[in-house]
Amino acid sequence: MRVKHIAEGTYTLTCDEGELSLIAEGLYAVQDTGQRCLDRGIPDEFDAPVLAEELRQLAEMRLTIAGAMGTEPVFRIIDGGQA
């Protein structure tokens, strides 16, 4: 995997399918843990909206990766292929 700094705040990630799949699975793990925290009411009323927005962004990232790979979501190892 390679990461290239293009401009302030912009990077290009170059990786193979296996690496991209691992990235997607890691995003799922973080998203799942965050959702469990929200479901249990762990974040207070100030942190909960921020976490909810971050979880939405993670879901978008996972769907973008799945679309780029031209397949069903690549999270089959962790969640049986559910996005």
Image (cartoon, rainbow, N blue to C red):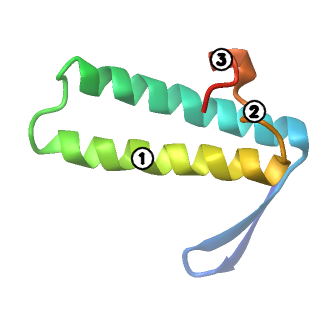
Q: CA distance from mark 3 to mark 1?
A: 19 Å
Q: Position of residue 51 (x, y in %)?
A: 30, 42
Helix, strand or loop at disc 3?
helix
52 left or right of 82? Answer: left
- Mark 1 or mark 2: name the one nearer the start of the chain: 1
Find residue 74 and name its label. 2
The amino acid on which the numbered mark 2 sits, given as a three-letter code, is Val
The image quarter containing residue 36 is: top left
Which one is nearer the viewer's eye here, 25 or 82?
82
CB-based contact (under 8 Å), mark 3 and mark 2: no
Find residue 56 and name its label. 1
Furthest toward the bottom, the residue is: 7
In this rendering, is residue 68 above or below 8? above
Helix, strand or loop at disc 2?
loop
Find residue 78 and name its label. 3
In this rendering, is residue 12 above or below 51? below
Helix, strand or loop at disc 1?
helix
